[in-house]
Image: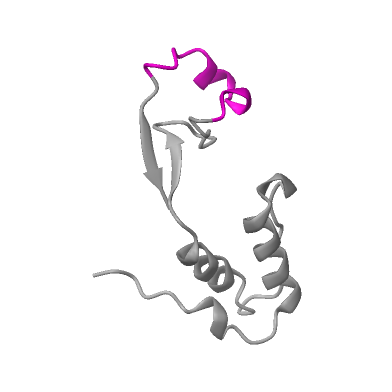
Amino acid sequence: MKNLIFPFSAIVGQERVKKALVLNAINPSIGGVLIKGDKGTGKTTAVRALADLLPPLKVVKGCPFNCDPDDQGSLCESCKTEKSEDIQVEEKR
């Protein structure tokens, strides 16, 4: 059974958190979002809700940095050492 995720559109308040998450999803070159707040304010709920909306990503299998196999210029040192025909690809959420 799939874990039930609270819908992102149903989150009330937290406008700055939601905006930051959406902007990072649109433009990942922002580099991430640091969410800080009191316990119980819905930080994890917001992140999981947005992640559930995003499409799966193609990544290099086993790469801890989730390198994009189609962007040879942005591969980490570990992925660069492999030959491009030997790189295995998997989809991650």
- Residue 77, relative to residue 88: is it above or below? above
Q: Position of residue 27 (x, y in %)?
A: 68, 52
- Identify the residue shown where x is 54% and y is 17%: 80
Q: Position of residue 8 (x, y in %)?
A: 54, 76
- Identify the residue shown where x is 63% and y is 87%: 12
For the question of whether residue 81 can be seen, the reply is yes
- Residue 21, relative to residue 83: is it above or below? below
Q: Which residue range is magenta in the image?
A: 71-86
- Residue 50, relative to residue 77: is it above or below? below
Q: Position of residue 53 (x, y in %)?
A: 48, 66
Question: Between residues 75 and 44, which one lies in front from this camera angle?
Answer: 75
Question: Is 51 situated left or right of 23 in this image?
Answer: left
Question: Between residues 38 and 52, which one lies in front from this camera angle?
Answer: 52
Q: How many marks?
A: 0
Q: Is residue 74 magenta?
A: yes
For the question of whether residue 35 can be seen, the reply is no
Considering every residue shown, the one lying at the far left of the view is 1
User: Which color scheme did the rendering employ for the protein?
Assistant: one colour
Question: Between residues 39 and 33, which one lies in front from this camera angle?
Answer: 33
Q: Quadrant of residue 90?
A: top left
Question: Is 61 situated left or right of 69 in this image?
Answer: left
Considering every residue shown, the one lying at the far front of the view is 70
- Residue 23, relative to residue 63: is it above or below? below
Q: Position of residue 25 (x, y in %)?
A: 62, 57
Q: Quadrant of residue 11?
A: bottom right
- Identify the residue shown where x is 71% and y is 58%: 34
- Identify the residue shown where x is 60% and y is 77%: 42
Q: Which part of the image, by quadrant, shows the N terminus? A: bottom left
